[in-house]
Image: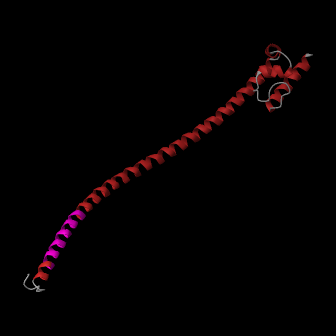
Amino acid sequence: MSRDKTKRAIELAIIRINKGRPKVVAPTRKLSIASVAEEAGISNATIHNRYPALADQIRQINNKTSREKLAGKETALKDADLLLKELREAVAEREADLKKLAVANLRLSTENKSIQQQNLLLKQENEGLVLKNRKLLAEVNRRGGDVTRIR
């Protein structure tokens, strides 16, 4: 191949690989001097030695792509950091709510035990009154229904 044809083959290979439509290399292959050389049908050394400007162009495209990817990842990282901060704040709020609920639960549990104890005392008192009432009724029935004498 003549020098001009080789240069044109390299340039076309760069374009095809960059657009994701190569003819020789796999479409998923990244742009590199090796992939361009393979696509153009020449050796890596030919690009390095005879076409250093094209080699620099390939490196610049790779650097640009890398910078773009890095910028995208930095943006995604900032978004993730913001989301993480929001989630941590939400977790802190939920933990505070949980502590308040635990305190209220403990208070209600203590109050419930107190009420259960009061109920038990009232039940015992009621049973005592029922027993007294039965005794009084039995005595009234035995004496012929005269309630005035019992008092």
Residue 138 percent coordinates (x, y): 14, 78
Look at the image and name its color scheme: secondary structure
89 is higher (above) or lower (below) than 74: below
**Magenta part of the chain:** 119-137
Q: Quadrant of residue 10?
A: top right
**Left or right: where 83 falls relative to 118:** right
Identify the image quadrant of the C terminus: bottom left
Residue 6 percent coordinates (x, y): 88, 19
The structure residue drawn at horizontal position 69% and vertical position 29%, both measured from the top left corner, is 66
The structure residue drawn at horizontal position 90% and vertical position 16%, both measured from the top left corner, is 3
> Would you say residue 116 sits in the magenta stretch?
no
Residue 103 percent coordinates (x, y): 33, 53
15 is higher (above) or lower (below) than 52: below
Q: Quadrant of residue 39?
A: top right
**Left or right: where 54 falls relative to 2:** left
Q: Quadrant of residue 1?
A: top right
Q: Main secondary structure of the magenta part?
A: helix
Tell me how many marks there are: 0
The structure residue drawn at horizontal position 80% and vertical position 20%, both measured from the top left corner, is 53
140 is higher (above) or lower (below) than 80: below
The front one of 149 and 116 is 149
**Left or right: where 27 falls relative to 132:** right
Residue 18 percent coordinates (x, y): 79, 30
